[in-house]
Image (cartoon, grey):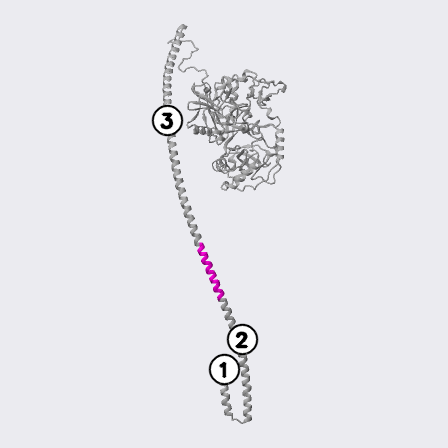
């Protein structure tokens, strides 16, 4: 088993993580030190309200490829109190799931939820094989070996086979709840029963090694091999018997395969290859078809398949569908309406009830559409192939995006206790202990006890929005309803008691228990004595003095008079009730007509309001467009003016720069000229100093020569002194 590269561990711890851990999910795709739980509580509530819509919006506009994608929140960790919520993106295409997880990370939608992590896996962690739509090809064949076995067939309406003629073969699904829309009656089933084989066939599965790929935040790098965990699991289950919980969650025995069911063995017809129920005979209690409680120990040679003629009331061939979710705004809901005619037609007389024997006087009535609870709910799934089976409805939605679709659809996992699902079980209703309709099965893992359903609340809301009128569950009105208390610890006990061929009188006595649910059932088939009818006293009649009356005729006449009086009273009451019923029916019709008129008026008002809103929106958009164009024109004008100003400023700046450069050049030339002139003047001054020094030297020599000549010639000293004074004065003046 191969484990992909790991990502950094989450740093933010989830507060009170153990309160968000539901039932444990047994899977071999996580490391040895990690465990997986169904997420519930605060973590699931925050995910569904704040994170899941953002994921749907993020991936809606991303082309991820043609593949089915699951998004599910799990609690993963070594212990419940240290676990963290991990958003797993599951797809058999590694590229698709990697791109989806990358888009979720890049969008930043988890920036405000640092305690949540992400991961990716080839399959959801609860699946061992690839799930698919459970539409069947070729109608199923019922098999029985005794009258009791035939009597175990569930209600002729709920759970019956719906056969649809396709282009290449016959498709069949399971009939769901009976609903009334106006004056017409329909039966719910899945929408993909009418699709082509290419749209519903998901048989192309990747190699087995690809289904084991899994990684998530918090998967440490030093974990042991996942294959070791798988081997340990197999070894553990081989050493000891498997508990019911473990068997329910694995739901698939690789040793025996899908041919070894807990209730019946399966053989294969030569033509269609569809599993056919056969009866196993052996020692011990007689086996009762697909509701047998004990596995037969007989050899395969004693198993004998004897196909029976299918009862026409248990198979309904349909040629058209009234409404399909694929034609509406929510194609992922996967439902269709099978028309049964008006309320007075024969097909429309079917009841929303589940019977476990033909003479079952206390059937389970499907009474109301209910939302999926935030905690685990015990349910009864009326599957078409395996029959009614108890199970658990897992809280928290699994978000599923089918190939070719853009939006995600909420699916809820259903874990059956014993019965496994097969092709043909799509459309099976999932109901609660008190008759709540939670949804119908649309896909699952064939050969296992795991299935997925769409919620009935969303289906009925979509039907109401499309039909512009309310859809209601069809209820029987032949007899009043009574209420009895039944044990709530396990519906299977009630199912077993309902199947008993000869129940004892004490079987119907309510047992004392705590936390029991109120389960309603129809008692129209029970024998009841009118309350006003006197019962015969086994003691002999007595006179006023307490002595026994010896005349038997008096007692008989008295009893007949009492019966006649009671009969007259009941007849009068019956007439009054009939009159009241007729008045109520007339009032109901008037109210229905008034409601229809109000709905038409409301529809007209809504259309007018919608048109006005559209007109106002168009005007607003036109005004906004005009303002936008005006602003864009002004913006362009301002941009052009700015460009002109910038151009002028640039030209002026360039001219000024050139002028300054010329001025600097002229100044440099002037400075150079002044420097040259200064150097010339300095050179002339130096030459003049040299000439002056030469002149002084010559003058000194001349003075000395004159002095010498005076001495020789005898010139007086005074004259010489005056001459010397004049010479010195001239020298000083020259120096200055």
Assess whether mark 3 and mark 2 are in contact (beta carbons under 8 angstroms).
no
For label 3, the residue is 597
Magenta stretch bounds:
646-666
Secondary structure of the residue carrying tag 2 is helix
Q: Position of residue 437 (x, y in %)?
A: 47, 26
Residue nearest the observer in this picture, 718 or 683: 683
Disc ID at residue 734: 1
Circle 3 Cα neighbour tier, 10 Å, few/some/many (<14 / 14–19 / ≥20): few
On screen, residue 540 versus residue 680, left or right, reads: left
Residue 150 sits above or below residue 69 on the image: above
Q: Residues within 10 Å of mark 1 (few under 14, many from 20)?
A: few
Q: Is residue 662 magenta?
A: yes
| Residue 439: in magenta span | no
Q: In the rendered image, which residue does mark 2 sit on?
A: 683
Instruction: Tell whether label 3 touches label 1 (CB within 8 Å).
Output: no
Residue 408 pos. (x, y %) = 50, 34
The front one of 598 and 714 is 714
**Which mark's residue is nearer the viewer, 2 or 3?**
2
Q: Is residue 648 placed above or below 718 in the rendered structure? A: above
- Placement of the N terminus among the 4 image quadrants: top right
Res 678 label: none
Q: Please tell me whether residue 93 is drawn above or below residue 656 in the rendered image.
A: above
Residue 445 falls in image quadrant: top right
């Amino acid at each position: 088993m191969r484990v992909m590269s790991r990502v950094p561990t989450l740093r933010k711890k989830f507060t009170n993580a153990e309160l968000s851990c539901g039932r444990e999910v047994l899977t071999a795709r996580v490391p040895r030190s990690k465990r997986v739980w169904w997420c519930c509580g605060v973590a699931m509530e925050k995910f569904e309200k704040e994170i899941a819509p953002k994921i749907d919006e993020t991936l809606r506009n991303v082309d991820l490829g043609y593949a089915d994608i699951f998004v599910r929140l799990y609690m993963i960790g070594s212990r419940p109190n240290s676990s963290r919520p991990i958003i797993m993106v599951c797809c058999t295409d590694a590229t698709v799931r990697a791109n989806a997880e990358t888009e979720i990370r890049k969008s930043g939608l988890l920036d405000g939820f640092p305690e949540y992590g992400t991961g990716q896996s080839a399959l959801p962690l609860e699946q061992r094989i690839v799930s698919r739509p459970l539409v069947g090809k070729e109608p199923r064949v019922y098999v029985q070996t005794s009258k009791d076995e035939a009597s175990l067939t569930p209600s002729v309406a709920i759970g019956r086979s719906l056969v649809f003629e396709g282009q290449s073969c016959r498709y069949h699904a399971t009939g769901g709840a009976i609903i009334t829309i106006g004056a017409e009656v329909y039966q719910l089933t899945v929408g993909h029963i009418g699709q082509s084989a290419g749209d519903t066939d998901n048989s192309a599965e990747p190699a087995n090694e690809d289904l084991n790929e899994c990684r998530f935040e918090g998967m440490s790098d030093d974990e042991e091999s996942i294959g070791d965990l798988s081997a340990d699991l197999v070894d553990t289950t081989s050493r000891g018997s498997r508990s019911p919980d473990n068997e329910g969650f694995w739901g698939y025995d690789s040793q025996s395969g899908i041919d070894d069911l807990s209730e019946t063995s399966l053989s294969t017809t030569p033509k269609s290859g569809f599993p056919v129920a056969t009866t196993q005979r052996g020692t011990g209690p007689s086996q009762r078809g697909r509701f047998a409680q004990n596995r037969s120990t007989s050899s395969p040679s004693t198993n004998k398949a004897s196909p029976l003629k299918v009862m026409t009331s248990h198979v309904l061939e349909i040629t058209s569908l009234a409404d399909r979710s694929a034609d509406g705004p929510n194609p992922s809901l996967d439902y269709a309406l099978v028309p049964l005619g008006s309320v007075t037609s024969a097909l429309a007389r079917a009841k929303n009830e589940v019977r476990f024997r033909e003479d079952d006087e206390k059937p389970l009535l499907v009474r109301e559409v209910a939302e999926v609870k935030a905690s685990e709910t015990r349910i009864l799934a009326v599957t078409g192939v395996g029959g009614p089976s108890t199970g658990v409805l897992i809280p928290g939605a699994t978000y599923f995006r089918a190939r070719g679709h853009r939006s995600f659809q909420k699916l809820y996992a259903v874990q059956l206790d014993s019965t496994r699902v097969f092709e043909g079980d799509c459309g099976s209703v999932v109901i609660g202990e008190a008759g709540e309709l939670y949804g119908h099965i649309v896909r699952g893992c064939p050969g296992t006890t795991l299935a997925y359903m769409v919620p009935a609340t969303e289906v009925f809301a979509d039907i109401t929005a499309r039909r512009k009128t309310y859809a209601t569950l069809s209820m029987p009105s032949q007899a009043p309803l009574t209420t009895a208390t039944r044990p709530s610890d396990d519906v299977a006990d009630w199912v077993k008691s309902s199947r008993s061929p000869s129940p004892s009188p004490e079987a119907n006595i309510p047992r004392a228990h705590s936390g029991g649910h109120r389960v309603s059932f129809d008692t129209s088939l029970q024998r009841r004595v009118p309350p006003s009818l006197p019962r015969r006293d086994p003691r002999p009649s007595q006179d006023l003095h307490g002595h026994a009356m010896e005349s038997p005729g008096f007692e008989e006449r008295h009893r007949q008079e009492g019966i006649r009086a009671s009969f007259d009273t009941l007849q009068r009451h019956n007439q009054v009730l009939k009159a009241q019923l007729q008045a109520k029916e007339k009032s109901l019709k008037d109210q229905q007509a008034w409601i229809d008129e109000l709905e038409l008026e409301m529809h007209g008002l809504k259309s007018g309001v919608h048109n006005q809103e559209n007109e106002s929106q168009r005007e607003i958009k036109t005004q906004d467009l005009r303002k936008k164009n005006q602003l864009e024109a002004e913006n362009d004008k301002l941009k052009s003016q700015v460009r002109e100003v910038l151009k002028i400023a640039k030209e002026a700046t360039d001219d000024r720069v050139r002028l300054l450069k010329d001025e600097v050049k002229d100044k440099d030339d002037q400075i150079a000229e002044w420097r040259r002139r200064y150097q010339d003047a300095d050179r002339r001054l130096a030459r003049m100093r040299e000439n002056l020094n030469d002149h002084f030297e010559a003058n000194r020599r001349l003075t000395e020569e004159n002095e010498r000549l005076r001495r020789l010639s005898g010139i007086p000293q005074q004259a010489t002194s005056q001459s010397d004074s004049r010479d010195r004065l001239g020298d000083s003046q020259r120096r200055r």
